[in-house]
Image (cartoon, grey):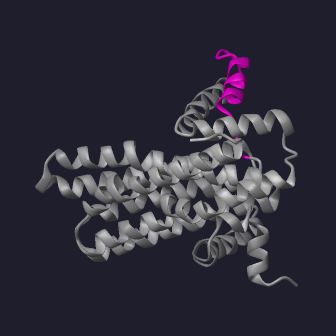
Amino acid sequence: MPSLKQQVIATMKSRDTEGPFELYVTRTPGYLWALLFRRLRVHPIVVTVVSMLIGCASGYFFYLPELKYNLVGMLLLIWANWYDCADGQLARMTGKTSQIGRVLDGFAGDLWFFCIYSGIAERLRPEWGLWSWLLVVVAGVFFHARQCSLADYYRNAHLYFIGAANELERSADIEAEYRSLRWISKDWFHKLYLMCYASYTRGQENPTPQFQKLYNNVRERYGHSLPSELRTQYRTLSLPLMPLCQILTFDARVGVLFLSMVVGLPWLYPVLEITAFEALRIYVNRRHEKGCKTILGLKD
């Protein structure tokens, strides 16, 4: 019988995009929850919704100034993240994967951090006034969102090129499906969803012009049957960036959040998003674009 580690790895898309911390601290507990949910016949989307509620509740405990309550918020956020891992693992285990499930999974994280930012802003407001809200809005909307979006896009690109998963979609394809549907029909909700999803995908594509040239060229020439030499070439470019993308998504970001609460400086978290995390995003973006240009055979 496979070991627990082997069972967990079997539910992951690729080891390339998951480090040891993710394997042992997030994916393994998530897998154990997924086993329970499968036994109870819980649908993956239900798990996603529950993770939303738990993650949003953590925001209230980050609003409170006492460390003991902040610790409760930390535990709730960790719990929500385990469920966030479990829903994807459960979907792959049961074959209940869906496009709406992937988008809802991403929306859950956005909702968590909306509540967390709101808690931080209200905690700072007695001393900072409305400047606290300006800080978190700038950090969340203009920095956090695009950092996570780009990191998620690069991870999906990596999975596509190594043949581990095919969740990399083009906004033009999504828009074509969107235009094929009518508002006054039973498909109105799906059309609304496609409109939002296309906008999100365009936001991922805009900072990656060289990758778009490479991806469109590859899709036109090979479809999804990429030659092994190209897969190896892209993996050589992308693999060193995967740990940096992990930093830009959840684990390191939450570590900074927790540290800011422990030292009693909640403003430190959004400030580091605006500075250190943004500097890392720019570095990853430029390095990836340069690598794509090399693969295309273009000169600087």
In the image, residue 249 lies in the stretch drawn in magenta:
no
In the image, residue 169 lies in the stretch drawn in magenta:
yes
Q: Is residue 67 left or right of residue 30?
A: left
**Image label count:** 0
Image spot of residue 47 (x, y percent): 63, 58
Residue 187 visible here: no
Image spot of residue 202 (x, y percent): 57, 33
Residue 159 visible here: yes
Image spot of residue 277 (x, y percent): 40, 57
Which of the 4 quarters of the picture holds residue 184?
top right
Q: Is residue 91 left or right of residue 25?
A: right
Range shown magenta: 167-185
The N terminus sits in image quarter:
bottom right
- Above or below residue 76? Residue 42 is above
The C terminus sits in image quarter:
top right
User: Residue at horizontal 64%, vertical 74%?
Assistant: 23
User: Residue at horizontal 45%, vertical 46%?
Assistant: 145
Residue sticking out furthest to the left: 127
User: Residue at horizontal 58%, vertical 60%?
Assistant: 241
- Above or below residue 52? Residue 222 is above
Image spot of residue 101 (x, y percent): 67, 47
Which of the 4 quarters of the picture holds residue 162?
bottom right
User: Residue at horizontal 60%, vertical 34%?
Assistant: 197
> Along the line of sight, which residue is nearer the eye, 45 or 154?
154
